Image (cartoon, rainbow, N blue to C red):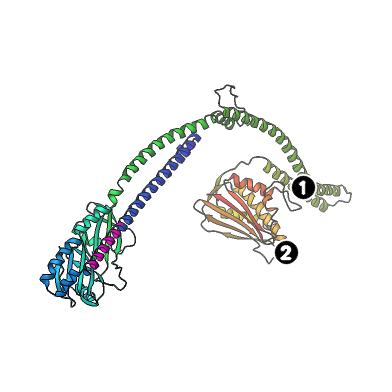
Amino acid sequence: MRLFSSLTNRIFVATAALAVLAIAVAVYRINVAVTAQAENELRRGLVEAATLLEEHRTTLFDHFSREARLVADLSNMKAAIATGDPPTVLPIATDYQRQIGSDLFVVTDPHGRVLAETGRIRVAPTEAVVVETLANATAGREVVALWPYEGGVLQIVAVPSYSGPELIGTVTVGSSLDEAALARFKALTNSEIAFVLGGQVRASTLDPTFNDRLASLVGRADFPNVELDDGVYAALSRPLTLTSSEPDSARVAASPITALILRSRTERLRFLRIVHRELAVTAVLAVLAATLLSYGIARSITRPLGAITATMRDMASTGDLTRRMPETSNTSWDDEDARLLAATFNAMTDSIARFQREASQKERLSSLGRLSTVVAHEIRNPLMIIKAALRSLKSPEVTPDDVKAAVSDIDEEVARLNRIVSEVLDFARPIKFDLTTVDINALCADAAHATASDDDGIRIQLDLEERLPAVTTDGERLRIALVNILSNAQHAAGGAAGLEPGKDAEFVRLRTRRQGADRIAIEVRDHGTGIAPDDLPRVFDPYFTTRRTGTGLGLAISRNIVEGLGGVITVSSQKGRGTEVRIELPL
C-alpha cells in the first residue's frame, strides 16, 4: 500500500474521492429527478389523454341520445311509424340519419319488427344483445347498449316513440367506436388508442398483430409497459361507461368496454439520453477539475510539513528530542502556517528538553527513594538474623552445634540478601535473552516442582496439553517468570478462608494449551483470596505488593521477561474467588 504511505497522497486521494463522491451523488440525484419528472409527465399525459377521450366520447354519445329523443318525438316520424309500412318509413329514417350523422339508424314497430335500417354500419338483428335492446325499448324504456361488430363497437341508444299514451315503435341511434373514430381520438389526444370488449380488441390504431398483447393490459391499475416493434409503450386502462339522462332507462351490454391509451415511452424519454450525455461530460470535467484542485490542496498542506518531517527524521536517527527546526525568514512570500508550525515545534522541543531534565532528576530521586525503602526493609531482617548469629558465636559457652546452626543461619540469610539484590538488578538492567528450543510442558513441570511446598499443603495440579510443539524462547528466563507467578498463586491460595491443608491439592492449577496456529498459552489459576478491583490495574507496577514480605518486583520482572520474549501476560481476578494469570507466547 505504497500509495497511502505519503501524507500528500492520502490527502490527495481523500479530497479527490470526496469530490468525486459529491459529483457522483449530485449527478445521480439529478438523473433520478429528471427521470422521475419525465415518468410523471408521461403518466400525467396518459391520464389527461384518457380524460379527454372519455369527455369527447361522452359528449358525442349525449348528442346522439338527445337527437334520438328529438327524432322519436317528431310528428312525421310518428306518422310514418304508425303506418307500419317499411317503404314509407325508410326515406324519412334515411333523411334523419344523414342530418344527425349517426353510424346506425333503426326504426321498429311496437312488436320489435324492423321497419327501417340505415347508416354505414349494419348489425345482424338476431344478435342476442340487439334482441335484448329492442325488447327493452318496445317495453317503453329508453335503453343504452353496446353492440359489437366486426371492426368496432356501436354505442346504442334506443328511444320509445309514443302517440299520446300509446307506444307506436322505437327509434335506435348508434355511433361507432371503430378505426375512423379512433383516428379522430388519436389526433385529439396524441396517443395510440384501442377499444377492448369481452377480452377482444375490437378496434385499434396499432397493428392488429399486437391485439393479444393489448388485451392482456385490460384492468391493470398501474401504468404497465408493453414492448412493440417500434419501442416500449406505457399504457393506461380506462373503463368506459354508458349512461342516460332518463331516470328509468335501462342498460344492456354483453360486457364492459375498455379504452387503452398508449404513449411511446421510448419516444417520450428520448431526451433523457441527451441529458445523461451532458451530465456525463459535465461530471468528467468536474472530476478532472476536482482532481487537480485536490492535488493542489494536498501539496499546499504538506509542503509546510517538509521541514518538520526532516527534523523528526533526524530525531529518530539520533535520538535527540531537543533538535530544533530551522526558522524561516519572515517575508511576505513565506507561508504563515509554516512559520507558526516551526515556532510551535521549537517551543515543544524546548519544553521537552526542560521536561527531560526535570523528569530525569525526579525519576532518579523517586527511584532512589523507592529502592532505598525496599532494599532497607528487605535487608533489615537478614542483617538482624546475621547479627544474632554472630552474637551467639561470641558467647564463651558456644558449642559446635551452636556454631553449626549460626553458620547455617548466616548462609541462609546471605542467600536471601543475594536474591534481593539479584531481583533489584534484574529489574533495573536490560535483560539479555538466550534463545533455544524449549519443551514448554517440561519447563512448566520443572517450575511447578521448584515451587512445590509440603508445609502449607498447597500443591500444583498440572494440566498439560499433549503433543504441544517446541517453542523457541529463553527457557531459564521463562522459568523464573513462572516460578514468580506460581509462588504468588500459592501465597494467595494459602490465605484463602476455609482451606484444609493436604485436602485441597488442586487449589493451584498450571495449564498449557495451543492458541491458534502460531501461539501457545500458559495459564496459572488459583482459588485464593483474589485481588481487589482497585489493586488489579497496579499488579505489574514495580514495588507494588500487598504482602508484608514481598518486594513488589516479581510480577514486574515476569512481565519484562514475557514481553521481551514477544509474548503477552494478563491478570484477571475476582475478589474471594481467585486469580488467573495468562501468558501467550509465539512459537
CA–CA distance between discs 2 and 1? Answer: 28 Å
Picture coordinates of residue 28 (x, y %)?
40, 46
Q: Nearer the viewer, residue 397 or 327?
A: 327
Q: Nearer the viewer, residue 33 or 494?
A: 33
Disc with the residue nearer the chain's start (2 vs 1) = 1
Q: Are the two marked residues, 2 and 1, in contact with CB atoms closer than 8 angstroms?
A: no
Picture coordinates of residue 394 (x, y %)?
87, 47
**Residue at the far right in the pictured view:** 396
Give the residue displayed 74% in from the left and 40% down from the top. Answer: 366
* Vertical relation: 28 (above or below) 531: above
Disc assigned to residue 378: 1
Picture coordinates of residue 46 (x, y %)?
31, 55
* Vertical relation: 10 (above or below) 116: above
* Vertical relation: 82 (above or below) 153: below
Disc assigned to residue 345: none
SS assignment at label 1: helix
Q: Is residue 133 visible?
A: yes
Q: Alpha-carbon neighbours of circle 1 within 10 Å: few (<14), some, or many (≥20)?
A: some
Q: Alpha-carbon neighbours of circle 2 within 10 Å: few (<14), some, or many (≥20)?
A: few
Picture coordinates of residue 510 (x, y %)?
61, 58
Q: Which mark is nearer the camera, 2 or 1?
A: 2
Q: Is residue 379 magenta?
A: no
Give the residue displayed 35% in from the left and 49% down from the top. Answer: 38
SS assignment at label 2: loop
Residue type pointed to by label 2:
Ala
Q: Main secondary structure of the magenta part?
A: helix
Which contiguous range is marked in magenta? 52-70
Residue type pointed to by label 1:
Glu
Disc assigned to residue 497: 2
